[in-house]
Image (cartoon, helix red, strand yellow):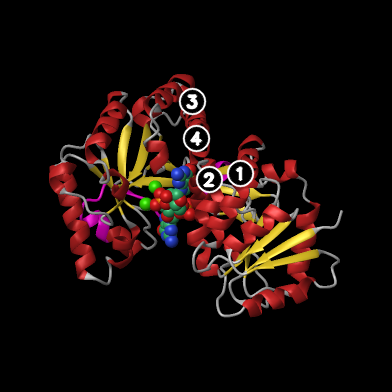
Amino acid sequence: MQNTLLLVDDEPNILRALERVFQDEGYHILTATSGEEGLNLLTRFSVQVIISDQRMPNMTGSEFLTQVKKHYPKIIRIILSGYSDFEAIKEAINEGAIYKFLVKPWDDDLLRKEIHDAFLINTDQKEKEQNLIRLMNHAKLSGFSLKPNNDLLISENEILNAIETEQFIIYYQPIVKAQTGQLYGAEALLRWQHPKHGFLNPKDFIPLCEEMDLIIPVDTWVLHKACQQLKEWQTQGHADLSISINLSASFFNKPDLYKLVKEVLLTTQIPPDSLKLEITESLIMQNIESNIVILQQLSNLSVKISLDDFGTGYSSLSYLKNFPINTLKIDKSFIDNIVIDRNSAEIVAAIIGLAKILNLSVIAEGVETEDQLNILKEKHCDYIQGFFFSKPVPKQEFELLLNKHYPN
Ligand code: C2E
Ligand code: CA
Ligand code: CA
């Protein structure tokens, strides 16, 4: 049986250029200038691979491929489109309607190889790889540049596998008492030692985990693992140490979050008030009424809540006093400028003043210099976190910091 390739693009000259790329590959080539025409051809021919453009007048490429998936699930469906179309087709990728996203303008050899490989894929493997997102980035791409990390090829299975094979690593960053220089706690910050892509920071993979609906297992793992670690340190003599964990929006809204936290407290036996859950200010302001209920349940467990990135969202002060929260974390963007910019310094002073009135403690994030530290101490900020003391470090290195006295 001959391999049949269907090319769909509303611009005839692009169709012809694509045809030329594949003319010596031995495929049976069909062409269509619209999704409708493509669907029509599929009723008459047996096609194994489709390449479609996204921007077409009536039916977009992703709509066309969604139809194809519904009626011909075994066909390998590829979109070849501009990078700026990515947002528009993301949903279709996540739903598995698009197997691959290749970027125009293409490189002939790479494109031939991709299509050659596509014909070799069997359907079972295809199912597994549905969530694969591949951006083809090549030196010949012109007109726009892809950031190196947009090149990541990460599938759902890789993320799940990373949890099982311990490719995720938690780094810990010290939080220090401003007035005494004593270590107060650590913030757990996730890293990924990826077998192919190397060492990844959260910005490279947390948004992907969120898009693929996999952030809940990831956050659950971090919560368990970091609390276990805290217990170990507490048992070794650092009884007052606390741990701060970042919660994503979907994790915070998980219906049984309360139960999960309770279970972690039970299994690790850490004092509940040594667990601090960090939620961003903008998340908390979204569904205020239901969030207050969730916060109340958590605070009934005696765990502590911090508002992260404080100052960047739009907190209504009248609500703030109703929230069962404990700490404000002043966003790094204010700290960056406190030495040189009076406004930033005044905002920071005002946030600290507000916190005192509301009986909340304050952490300044992203403190990098001694001058910044001195201003913050002068303004009676309670806790300091930042590169001035230490970057986030792996467990073994954090243990060296446990007994250190910090400059104050
Ligand atoms: P975040 O919660 O605001 O964490 C603080 C970020 O600021 C960290 O970046 C930290 O390394 C960085 N930082 C701390 N002090 C300094 C400083 O003095 N200078 C500079 N330039 N940066 C500083 P990181 O580790 O890359 O984390 C980025 C974000 O990823 C975090 O922002 C948090 O929102 C998210 N994240 C990290 N771990 C997790 C996790 O386990 N679950 C979830 N859902 N999100 C996480
Ligand atoms: Ca945080
Ligand atoms: Ca923050």
The residues colored magenta run 375-397
Res 276 quadrant in image: top left
The reply to whether callout 2 and callout 3 are in contact (CB within 8 Å) is no
Q: Amino acid at mark 2?
A: Met
Q: Amino acid at mark 4?
A: Ala
- The nearer-to-camera label among 2 and 3 is 2
Q: Amino acid at mark 3?
A: Thr
How packed is label 3: few (under 14 Cα within 10 Å), some, or many (20 or more)?
A: few
The reply to whether callout 2 and callout 4 are in contact (CB within 8 Å) is no
Q: Secondary structure at mark 1?
A: helix
- The nearer-to-camera label among 1 and 3 is 1
Residue 226's label in the rendered image is: 4
Q: Which numbered disc, 2 or 1, marks the residue that appears first in the sequence?
A: 1
Residue 404: x percent and y percent? 46, 45
User: Could you tell me how far apart the alpha carbons at marks 4 and 3 are, in whole angstroms?
Assistant: 14 Å
Q: Which numbered disc, 4 or 1, marks the residue that appears first in the sequence?
A: 1
Q: Is residue 147 magenta?
A: no
Q: Is mark 3 within 8 Å of ligand 1?
A: no
Does residue 261 sit above or below 383 in this rendering? above
How packed is label 1: few (under 14 Cα within 10 Å), some, or many (20 or more)?
A: some
The residue positioned 58% from the left and 72% from the top of the image is 10
Q: Which numbered disc, 2 or 4, marks the residue that appears first in the sequence?
A: 2
How packed is label 4: few (under 14 Cα within 10 Å), some, or many (20 or more)?
A: many
Looking at the image, residue 169 sits to the left or right of residue 380; the answer is right
Q: Nearer the viewer, residue 150 or 261?
A: 150
Q: Amino acid at mark 1?
A: Glu
The residue positioned 48% from the left and 46% from the top of the image is 210
User: Could you tell me how far apart the alpha carbons at marks 4 and 1 are, in whole angstroms?
Assistant: 23 Å
Residue 340: x percent and y percent? 27, 72
Does residue 292 sit above or below 103 in this rendering? above
Residue 212's label in the rendered image is: 2
